Structures are given as C-alpha cells and as structure tokens.
Amino acid sequence: MRTLARTRHELAAYLQARRARLSPEEVGLPGGGRRRTPGLRREEVAALAGVGLTWYTWLEQGRDIGVSSAFLDKLAEVLKLDGGERRHLFLLAHARPPAEEGKTFCVVPPPVRRLMHELAHPAYVLNLRWDVLAFNAGADTLFGFGAHVPSRRNLLWLLFTDPLLRSRFTAWEEQAPLMLSSFRRDYARATQEADIHALVQELEKVSPEFKLWWRRHDVHAPCAGVRRLSIDGEQVAYEHTSLTIDADRHLRLVVYARQME
C-alpha cells in the first residue's frame, strides 16, 4: 500500500523524531564516538529494518512509495514504538490502525468502574470472551450476576445454562440466537485464546441449543437495540447499547435503560 499524500510529510517528520531519540546502544549497536546529530543514522535504521538505505531515505523524505504492514511492524520494532506509537505509525502510513489480535485477559480501569457504579441504569463490563468483569447494583438486580462465582460469571454461559437469566429474556428462543451471533464477532477477534475455545466447547456439550445455533455461523452486527425482559411477570422494554472503553477494543461497557413510554 502506498503512503498517503496528505500525511506523507507528517510521517516523514514522525520517523525522523523517533529515530533521533534512540541511541545505538539501545538497539544493540556499538556506541562509537560523538555524532553530529542525536539518535540513530538512517543507514542504521534501514539495516535493522532489512531495507535499502535509498528506499528508507525516500520514506523519510516523504516520497510517494509503497509500504507494507509487515514492514511497518518491523520498523515499529526497530524504533521501539509502544502500542500507541505503533498505531499512530499505521494511521499515518495507511490511514487505518494495524490488525491486532484480541485478548481475553483484561483489567477494568478504575475510572470506568467508578463511572459504571455512578450510572442510574444497569451496566456491566464485558471482555471479548463475554466474562462479566464488573457490574453495578442495577445490573445485579436485573441479571443476578452476584449469585455466581467469578469463574462462572460469563454472560454467554449464563444465557444458556442459568434458568433465572433464561427466564429473564422474553422470547428467549428469539433473543438468544441473536446474542450468540453477536458473540461470534468477538470470538473471531480472539480465536488464538485457549479460554474462549474452552468456553465454546463446554457449551456445546451442555446446551443443545447452543450447539445447533453455533454451527449456523450467523453473525449479527448491532450491539444496540431494544430487548424485552420479564420483570415480576410483566414484559418491560429496555434499550441497550455497548460502549468501547479501551483503546484496543477488548472491553465494552453495556448499559440497559428502561424504554420511555
């Protein structure tokens, strides 16, 4: 993919600045004597990244040349970019973030936890495996998360194995397949994680409905809409939405708000 005209000069300046902050010793090169300018030389970066000096010089000069994602990953490694800096490099070069594997082990940031508890509506935090990592009192009242040990506090598991949660969803046979097809999007992002495979395999053993619907490979895009819940024998409509709460898109805050009549 070719570098973009509108960001080419900013990309060039960014690479020069990242190169200037590194010393030869930091990348395993001998320090040598004093240098006219701080940081690594272009030829050193080019050699470490496995490209020719002329080609890399053109890149730093803002020339219109093609760069692959594999090269950008290698360059990010050479320049010792952190996650945010690597993402910025891809945005400048390709106008899109890099492809990143999803992960299921996450920690809920304290500010998000405080915000969740201050909400007037039921809310909880999910990772890509749909483990319920945090929930407020409203969500506990609505879905009974607190009755389960943390290792079983998984929304997908409870949806198919917990009679109380199953009875909470009006027309469960219609809503459960839609929720499962929404989960499949997150599953696709974290297929390298053993625990998400273990969850699917265990559910296939204990739930015939899960096994049947999972093998349909349906994918449902929306993470927002209206769900009808059974509350004290009455059907109550709740609007629900999910908000991404981390830069890597591994965590979502799910909020339910009773629909105004």
Image: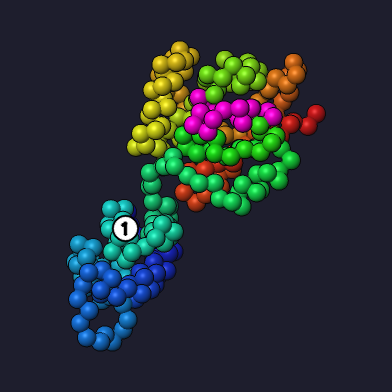
**Residue closest to the far right:** 261
- Position in image of residue 12 (x %, y %): 36, 70
Q: Nearer the viewer, residue 57 or 206?
A: 206
Q: Is residue 158 left or right of residue 190?
A: right
Q: Note whether residue 70 is visible.
A: yes
Magenta span: predominant SS is helix
Disc 1 crowd, CA 10 A, few/some/many (<14, 14-19, 20+): some
In this orientation, which residue lies closer to the viewer: 261 or 172? 172
Quadrant in the rendering for residue 102: top left
- Which range of residues does the magenta coloring cover? 141-157
| 41 w.r.t. 156: above or below | below
Q: Is residue 143 magenta?
A: yes
Tell me the residue at 71%/43% (across/down): 119
Check the image and report above or below for 259 versus 80: above
| Residue to which mark 1 is pinned | 72
Quadrant in the picture for the C terminus: top right
Residue 221 seen in the current view: no
Q: Position of residue 90 (x, y in %)?
A: 39, 57
